[in-house]
Structure formats: structure tokens, C-alpha cells
Image: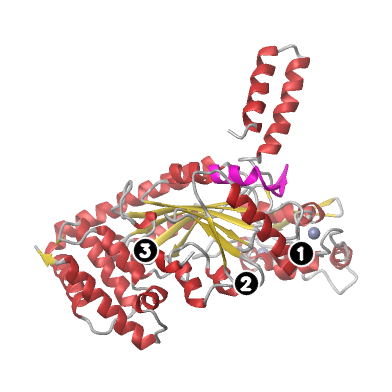
Amino acid sequence: MNLDTLLPHLGEWLRGTGPESDVVVSTRIRLARNLADLPFATRATAAHKAEVVSRAKDAVAKADAGHTLEYLDIPALPALDRQFLVERQLISRELAGGLEGPRGVAFDPTETASVMVNEEDHLRLQVLRSGFALDEAWRDIDRLDDALEARLSYAFHTQFGYLTACPTNVGTGMRASVMLHLPALGLTKQIDKVFRALQKINLAVRGLHGEGSRAFGDLYQISNHVTLGKSETKILNEIREVIVTILQYERQARNALLKERRQAEHDRVARAIGTLGSATMITAEETMELLSAVRLGIHLHLLDGVPVTAVNQLFIHTQAAHLQKIAGHALDGEERNAARAKYLKTKLRELGTHRQ
Amino acid sequence: MKCQICDNPATVHLTEIVNKKKRALHLCERCARERNLIADPPGPQLDLKALLNLLMNPFPHAGPSGGPADNVVTQAATDACEVCGLTLAEFKAEGRLGCPHDYDTLRPTLEPLLERIHRATAHSGKEPRAVRVREWRRQMQAAAAAEDYEEAARLRDLIRRSSSGQ
Ligand SMILES: [Zn+2]
Ligand SMILES: [Zn+2]
């Protein structure tokens, strides 16, 4: 597969539609699975890992799960292509760079399903959906899991459930994450309150890329922490309940913004689109901050002519590896800032943005 | 009940099982937090190394080497997994298991650890098809033995449908 063919497209999960898509960007579920008769990653030799790859490739090729998955060998990929797959959320940073030995990823062309091979666990299945779609994502990944299990012998323990390399994932092996765009809770300084409440009930919150607690672009991932002792459905229902509450908070905060400082908010959105469309040098961080304002502006009807899909596309396409693939060659930091500004300018002009 | 480290009231209770002997651990919140047994805000991440360390040596003030805690460490550390060779000490250092069999080898250490991480020690949820079918077979035989043929037939169909891959 030539990754350049993916470039002009946008994963299905970023199309900006789906339930509650004014706040919920995407839903992701992943399952950690290991083969019963091979050592986990820390104790696996290159030969063991090659065996995992060979069995996984075979299972993925023959699995009938509603997806055609194509396998890519990660060590054979140039660094830029690996980074590109990270930016598309198809693989983890670890699979791209930190790990050694035979490993890879299988994914379908619409980018809704992927299977990482030889990450921390032998297999990490993942399903991505646009909007708030826990049930659909679970149905999808459950089916993929069944299809793979028909050809692979999973490590399963009658007491501990699906066995994983790290005890934090054992049991269901399931991590469900919902990505939320929470600009209004950020602007009205209520976000910390939400975080404290989430931690109390044992849900994890992270920024889009997982580093630190500060989230660029007001994008947050909320996921379950407990994987043992509760069924998948119960875990998903608990997350759903919490997300529904946060949704209400965010919408209340948005309404309050409109009511109490419409003028100021309009100005902020207009300046954001102005800067994005006229800068000649711009960092990834500033881009995300400004796109966050634009995304909010769209949902508050303060801005005309920019579809949410376009904003999602700009979020992804202005990241480092994407810019370099668009340019067709490597770019250093300064060059990327210039390329990013140029790309934004062109795209926004194409959209013919104008303010109300 | 008093904290076993500092005499404050104990509010955190842990159980460890070493060589089939159960031992309770009672700590105040501060002592438990200092040893990272309670997740500190802002993250739910548990310090696996610190927890294992405490489980292997729960009484830091229990006196010089030769005390009961040290015996536990020596004995447990030599118990390597017969499949992958992982020892308790290595698990303590890496926080990762070596092979599926370790869940049995290290069960006495893992159970209290899982209790702290997940507040549970047993899975309830999806099972691989092979496991489900095995359980249905057992239930079908029990139903047939009890002359509940309707239930036995239902289970038989379930097994058939499952093995035809639907
Ligand atoms: Zn104490
Ligand atoms: Zn082992």
C-alpha cells in the first residue's frame, strides 16, 4: 500500500458527523489480545515476534469481519510514513518508534479498524468512529475480535479473563476513549472541576496526544481505567453516562458564552480565522488553539462557510508528518511553520470564508 | 485500627498472600499515598513498582535483615516461571509479565495488586468462543441429565450456530 493514497482523504472517524458531533469528535475502542502459547513482548525474541506477525497476518487476511484489512510492515516503513500513521491515529507512538523487532499494523482503507501487531500486547485491535458511538464501535470490534479468535488461540484465564502483558489491562483488555472538544468549559474555567470529578470515579483524562494534562485545541480523551471485574457493556454504560453529563455542561457553557459575551466571542472567532488565513509562520500549537476557536464558532453560528469536516481536516493535515508528505520532502521546524501557514492560507481561501 | 507504619487510624486495607499465607496490611491514607498505593491527582496511574515493593516488604521498620519480610522476599524471588523464567523480582523491576503462565505463577502477588488497580480480582465479561462453547457443552450435559430436553436442545443449537462461525 502506498500511504500517499491516504493523504487526500480523511479517516471516516474525522468526517465531523455522527451523534453529538458538536462536542464529541470521535469514539475509539481498543482490545488487547495475546496468543496463548507465546511469551509477552518483554520476553519475546525476534523469532517469537516473527511468529506473532505471521499468525496475525494470516488471521487478518482470512478474517471475515466486514473489513478488508491490509498489513503494513512497520520496520520497513520510512520514519515519515510511521509518523503519518501516528497522526492518523492508526498506530501508537511506541509501535512507530520506541519498539524493536518484527511488528506491524493492519487497517482498512476507511481507517475505521486497525490491528497493531507486537505493540505491548501481541494484538491491539482498534475501532474508530466519528461522533459519540460507543455501541456501534463495540459491535464492530466485538465482531472483529470474534473473526480473529476463530483463527487464533487467545491467552484467556478463567479467573483473570484476557491476559495482557501489563496487569492494568487484564480482564476485558478493553480501553474505550471518547474524544471531546470542550472549548467553552475551558473558557469559563470549569474544566478543572470536570477533571476532578472524573478522577474521583476512576476515568482517565488526557490531551489529544496523551502528553501532560494540558490539551492543545481543547481536545480531551476520556477513557476507562478499570478493565477487570466489569463486563464490556457495563464499562461502556458507565462512560456513556459520564459523557452525557459533560456534554450538557459544555453546551450550557456555550449558551452562557453566547448570552453573556457574544460580541467578545464573535471577535475571538473572527480573529482566529483572520490569523489562520493570513499568518506566514505558525506553530502546530497555535494552529490547534485557533482551530479550536473556529470549531466553536461554527457551532455557535458565529461563522459561515467553514464545514466542521474542513476544520477536522486542517487539524490533521497541519501536523508535522502530513505537511512533509504534502510537500513531498523533509522540512525542519521553521520550514514546517511556513508550510503550515501556506497550507492554511490556501485551504481557507478555497473555502471562501467570510464572516457574518 | 491503627496504621502499621505510623499509628494514625488505618483507612486503607490491603491483603497479601505469600506462600498460601494471608496477611493483612492496614495503613493510614497518608502512608498509603506516600507509597503510591492511592492514585494521586491528577492521574489514575498507579505506581506498580511501589506497590509491589510494599507488598514484598510491607514493614520497613521491622528491624534488620533476617526478619519475616526478608524471608518472604528471598523465597518469592527464586520462584521463577517455569515457562518464561520471569521472577517476582523481575516483575517488580519491569511491571510487565513475561508470559500468560505468569498469571498463575505470580497469582499471590497479582491478586492484591489487581484488587488495588481494578477493585476486583475476577473477570466478568466476554469470553472467547472456545471457552463459551465448552461451558455450553457442560450445561447441555447437565440439562440432559436432568431431563430438561428443551434446554438441552436450545444449548445444542447455540453450540452448532457458534461453531458454524455465525
Ligand atoms: Zn500511617
Ligand atoms: Zn512466564
Mark 2 — on which chain does it sit? Answer: A
Amino acid carrying label 1: it is: Pro
Mark 1 — on which chain does it sit? Answer: B
* Sequence-first disc among 2 and 3: 2
Residue span colored magenta: A143-161
Counting other residues with Cα less than 10 Å from the Cα at mark 1, is it few (<14), some (14-19), or many (20 or more)?
Answer: some
Pointers 3 and 1 in contact (C-beta within 8 Å): no
Both on one chain, marks 1 and 2? Answer: no
Q: What separation in Å lies between label 2 and label 3 (alpha carbons)?
A: 27 Å
**Which callout, 1 or 2, points to the residue nearer the camera?**
2
Q: Position of residue A99 (x, y in %)?
A: 62, 72
Q: Position of residue B105 (x, y in %)?
A: 82, 55
In the rendered image, which quarter is residue B27 located in? bottom right
Mark number displayed over residue B58: 1
Q: Position of residue A238 (x, y in %)?
A: 47, 44
Q: Work out whether A210 lies above or below A231.
A: below
Instruction: Name the element at disc 2.
Output: loop
Counting other residues with Cα less than 10 Å from the Cα at mark 3, is it few (<14), some (14-19), or many (20 or more)?
Answer: many
Pointers 1 and 2 in contact (C-beta within 8 Å): no
Q: Is residue B47 left or right of residue A351?
A: right
Instruction: Name the element at disc 3.
Output: strand
- Residue located 76% across and 14% down the image: B146
Residue on which disc 2 sits = A99
Residue on which disc 3 sits = A219
Q: Is residue A329 visible?
A: yes
Q: Is residue A354 left or right of residue A51?
A: left
Both on one chain, marks 2 and 3? Answer: yes
